[in-house]
Image: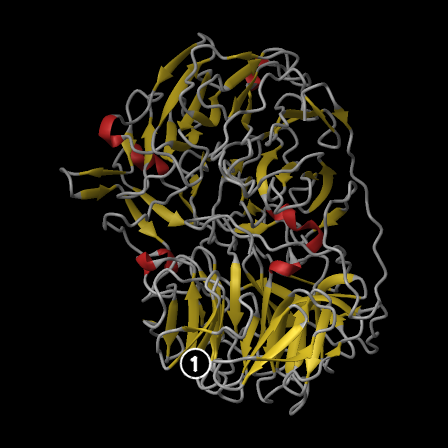
Amino acid sequence: MSRSGIFIALTAAVICPFVYAVNSQAYTWKNVKIGGGGGFVPGIVFNPTEKGLAYARTDIGGAYRLNSDNSWTPLLDFVDNARWNYWGVDALATDPIAPSRLYLATGMYTNSWDPNNGQILVSADYGATFTSSPLPFKVGGNMPGRGMGERLAVDPNNNAIIFFGARSGHGLWKSTNFGAAWSQVSSFPSVGTYIPDPTDTTGYNNDIVGIAWVTFDKSSGTSGSATPRIFVGVANAGSTNIFVTTNGGTSWSAVTGQNTTYLPHKGVISSSEQALYVSYSDGAGPYDGTSGSVARYSIANGTWKDITPVSGGDLYFGFGGVAVDLQKPGTIMVAALNSWWPDGQIFRSTDSGTTWSPLWAWSPSYPTLAKYYSYSAALAPWLGPNTVDLTLGDLQIGWMMEALVIDPFDSNHWLYGTGSTIYGGRDLLKWDTVHNITLNSWADGIEETSVQGLIAPPSGPILYSALGDIEGFIHNSLTTPPIAAYTDPKWSTCVDIDYAGLSPDYLVRIGTGDSSSGKQVALSFNYGASWSQHYGAADNVSGGKVALSADGGTVLWRTSANGVQVSANQATFTVVSSLPSTAVIASDKKTTGIFYGASGSSFYVSTDNGNTFSAMGSLGSSSLPVKIVVHPDVTGDVWVSSDTGLYHSTDSGATFSAISGVTQAWAIALGAPATTGGYPAIFVAANIGGTIGYFRSDDQGVNWVQINDAGHGFGAASANVMAADLRTYGRILKTLLDTQFSVYIGTNGRGIFYGDVNGTAPTSIAAPTSMSASSSTTRASSTTSKMTTTTNSATSHSSTSTPSTTSSASTTAGTPVAGYGQCGDYSQCTPN
């Protein structure tokens, strides 16, 4: 969009609830505790006027508010299928005049992976409720440069004024009515020129990163009037990239003498010093950065000083997070954006950057490493050893370190975000005396994992997860974080997992790596206590989906790029030419040798251990089957979800019946029956009666109850996975901590949820009355321009974290969207 003074007033409105034909049953929803976050935390912001108030944003898992016990409360769990891109938070701002006001710039991608424009979410009650103010362009919470910032800022003298820096060449935007309406600042001279990779054809790396940050100089104005002096950083390489206005944005000029070699990642003002501190890197982040600098700009004198902490061979990274201590003028901290060896690095200065001390150093000389902290990962033991790790190359301090803050009311309290957690402590001043601080993993309550697969076998551990970026876990408890991720082999991402129906101690999982991390198929014969590589798998073949035969002897593998393959007794995998390479696959859980597949409208069956498949019955007008699940005790009793509904066969796929009222379906799970000896409970993410939500049927799909509620939308339905416990209906199993549960929903960004039935089912369960299951449904291509005011489960901004709620189901309207991949840690950003 050109900078031609276009004014767009897009205001929020309340949408009236729909009336549904499906009744609801109350469930209590909580996160399966992984702890530690599990993904990239690109931004943390303290409110400068209310003590203890802070927020964190994530790239695919929404936003959180800090609690007094160092835990966090999620703010966007209401996000449903229609609003899935709300979980991509590209910027946040907390109001310095009215601290109850919170603003979030949300949207997932600026390319075709997200068809929707972005929005500014506005809260007047610390994030308990939000009103959406739509924008006329996309916002990229999971795009390159998402750690820059903050792009969103509230005027500290006149809080009705808010500025937002956009991506994709859309420039600088302004609101003068608390975010209700926005207009482009036509006088701003740059929309950004930096493109990470102009040759990329996906639209992901070849988009303009745009405005990087907006910083007000409060001291230049007076209360009640617009702040005159505002600094704005722009992702420009090789040209001016920091601009200033002295008249509230009427006119702008480039700050003279600035660094034009690198991209400005952060711009933070130390008001008592009248100084602007800027961190630079040679890339937009969050993965790159091989050089950079740190600079101090004297606002009074108009002069720059290079205060980069290291030089020469010690400078092999760019810089990300910058923090100033508002209680101690001249105290500044800066983080290496990505120091991949021997560990991440943070520097601290108490003399405005003249001298620095590091968090680690070679002492007395290389290769002896000295780290100046004690360490605790008690809340997330899977992060690594619960002690200081001196192994070169183990990134205990972190990577992707863009978020770094010091509590404006407490010089001892600090926090910083990494690619997998939030670290912090409350003894920071010891850095300046004994040069040894306490470093804690303080991301309790933040569950940001991208869940690729879940299984809940009938015996053994409660739950197994397959996760993006942090591989996955055996969950022996739902309320205690796991000790360690899968190992031997250890991968970054585990994309699927399965168990043998007759021998649930036999497991298979698959990864998405290459030969550098070993074979991408792993087997266990003891409930996951130990694993071994499947040496029949070819090097550099990975991804896809996997199914394990009922006896555990045969692995059927639909690879990501090498077709469907099969291996019996750990022999070399061979190609299965009779099954389409994109087929959905599953194994019969009762009879060895039987496998199932689905592609398009065709259903396939193999009775010879997956070596050959024959086409059987039809799935109506389906073009995209999603999931096959099989009755755990009855051979040939099969359920298939697809883009046109939910299908059931009791004759091994020879014939199928379409379940009435279900027009789309995604994840499916079978759980224990309501009555002893009865048919398993069916759980499904589906469109039933015009409602996209999560449902349970106790009578083979004749009647349904909706089990999610207004506070728990679980994001994009098409991206999620499900599992249900087979051991006991409703209150399925007691863990060691006496937790009771029934169904699991794995989200693409907010981790794993488990739901307990809370109360009785409706006395009369209405049958769906929508169109027949064979009808097709159009995928979403645009967003509505008026969105709803939404209440979430967070009601108090000062309490300890209680992120679970109990409420009845309510509206969950919308159309499906394509799954999106997490882009944290070492993974690549591609749709699932």
Identified by mark 1, the residue type is: Thr
User: Which of the 4 image quarters holds residue 246?
Assistant: top right
Given residues 694 and 409, the one toward you in this image is: 694
Q: How many labels does the image show?
A: 1
Residue identified by numbered label 1: 554
At which x and y percent is residue 375? 32, 50
Given residues 547 and 281, the one toward you in this image is: 547
User: Which of the 4 image quarters holds residue 438?
Assistant: top left
Work out which residue is located at the far bottom of the displayed protein and give it: 677
At which x and y percent is residue 98? 66, 32
In this rendering, would 330 be left or right of 619? left
- Eyeballing the image, is 442 above or below 747? above
Give neighbour class at mark 1: few <14, some 14-19, many 20+ (Cα, 10 Å): many
In this rendering, would 292 be left or right of 245? left
Residue 742 can be seen in this image? no
Residue 451 can be seen in this image? yes
Quadrant showing the N terminus:
top right
Given residues 648 and 529, the one toward you in this image is: 648
Residue at (50%, 62%) from the top-left corner?
33
Residue at (35%, 53%) from the top-left corner?
376
At which x and y percent is residue 149? 52, 32
Residue at (34%, 73%) from the top-left corner?
536
Given residues 529 and 517, the one toward you in this image is: 517
Work out which residue is located at the far front of the displayed protein and give it: 577
- Eyeballing the image, is 461 above or below 563? below
**SS assignment at label 1:** strand
Work out which residue is located at the far top of the displayed protein and give it: 301
At which x and y percent is residue 539? 34, 63
Quadrant showing the C terminus:
bottom right
User: Which of the 4 image quarters holds residue 590?
Assistant: bottom right
Residue at (72%, 51%) from the top-left corner?
780
In this rendering, would 330 be left or right of 223? left
